[in-house]
Amino acid sequence: MAKILVVDDAAFMRMRCTKLLKDNGYDTIEAGNGVEAVKQYQEQKPDGVLMDITMPDMDGIETLKKLIEIDSSARIAMVTAMGQQSLVIEALKSGARDFVVKPFNAERVLAAVVKIVG
């Protein structure tokens, strides 16, 4: 089964996504910020990434660009709060393959993961 890197600075969001993905047969890895996400991506080579846009240290857009630089075929879906359309557009232009709006529903998260990893 596909391995998904879940990146969010909010621990409860990581836990919610991780539980949902595991309950649906995915392996998961977690990162609490962009710096950690880049390290985990390089070490673990996940099949896909589900990443928050708004994070301290290195935000999701910066992390997305770094991951695409490391691996041009990286499969990344962004998670965003309502009202961040300009950031979503920037993320899609920078290589994100899909996005999920918070508060998200389980079906939408799973649909995004299926879209990025097949």
Image: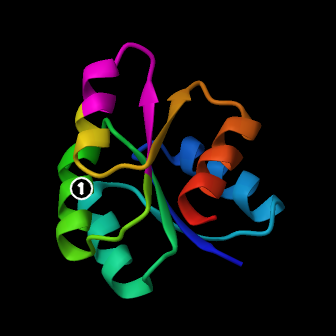
Q: Residue at x 39, y 56 (%)?
A: 32
Q: Residue at x 43, y 82 (%)?
A: 45
Seen in the picture, residue 48 relative to 100 is either above or below; the reply is: below
Residue 115 placement, left or right of 94: right
Q: Residue at x 36, y 86 (%)?
A: 43
- Give percent across and percent down for residue 55: 29, 41
Q: Is residue 40 magenta?
A: no
Which amino acid type is marked by label 1?
Thr
Q: Nearer the viewer, residue 53 or 116?
A: 116
Q: Residues within 10 Å of mark 1 (few under 14, many from 20)?
A: many
- Give percent across and percent down for residue 63: 23, 55
Q: What segment carries the magenta color?
A: 77-89
Residue 4 placement, left or right of 7: right
Give the labeled residue for mark 1.
63
Q: Is residue 79 magenta?
A: yes
- Give percent across and percent down for residue 10: 46, 42
- Give percent across and percent down for residue 96: 36, 49
Q: Quadrant of residue 78?
A: top left
Residue 56 in view in this figure: no
Residue 93 placement, left or right of 76: left
The outermost residue toward the top is 83
Q: Quadrant of the C terminus?
A: bottom right
Residue 110 in view in this figure: yes
Q: Residue at x 24, y 41 (%)?
A: 93
